Amino acid sequence: MSLDSIPRSSERKPMSLTVKSRVRSRVVFVDLVDLSEGGCKIRAKPGFAEVGDRVTMKVNGINAPLGVVAWVEGGMAGVAFEGAMHPAVIDFLCEGGALRGGPQLRRIY
């Protein structure tokens, strides 16, 4: 079974944002690859996280629900939120609202 074939409880929306997060109590800038009400996919340098690590993320003042790393594959990781992100917040972020008037964050490859 591939990671793309895992059933989802809500639709994943593609994103391209760099966000400030905390993994293992340290600040890590990650690329937010996709986002849904129940979780997200993030990318950073390989080794930035392990399965079971707690993750917090903030996008231009908007806190994502507390999450736990569900899987890691190289520099990619899946985060399962412990709560749900409201669909209106996801729509706002997808429409670029998180970038208007806020600081520009650097991209990590």
Image (cartoon, rainbow, N blue to C red):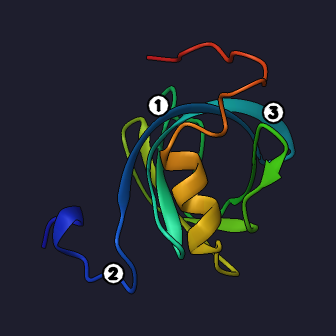
Residue at 64% x, 79% y is 84
Q: Earlier in the sequence, mark 2 or mark 3?
A: 2
Q: Earlier in the sequence, mark 3 or mark 1?
A: 3
**Amino acid type, residue under disc 3 in the picture:** Val
Q: Secondary structure at mark 2?
A: loop
Residue at 25% x, 77% y is 6
Q: Which sits in the foreground, 89 or 46?
A: 89
Compared with 46, 69 (above or below) is: below
The label nearer to you, 2 versus 3, is 2
| Residue 52 percent coordinates (x, y) | 62, 67
| Residues at marks 2 and 3 touching, judged by CB atoms closer than 8 Å | no
Total labels: the figure holds 3
Label disc, if present, on residue 61 of the rendered structure = none
Q: Earlier in the sequence, mark 1 or mark 2?
A: 2
Task: Please name the residue that numbered disc 2 is placed on.
Answer: 8
Q: Looking at the rendering, which quadrant does residue 26 occupy?
A: top right
Residue at 58% x, 48% y is 93
Task: Please name the residue that numbered disc 3 is placed on.
Answer: 27
The C terminus, quarter of image:
top left
The N terminus, quarter of image:
bottom left
Task: Please name the residue that numbered disc 1 is placed on.
Answer: 46
Residue at 52% x, 17% y is 108
Q: Secondary structure at mark 3?
A: strand
The label nearer to you, 1 versus 2, is 2
**Amino acid type, residue under disc 2 in the picture:** Arg
Q: Which sits in the foreground, 51 or 89?
A: 89
**Amino acid type, residue under disc 1 in the picture:** Pro
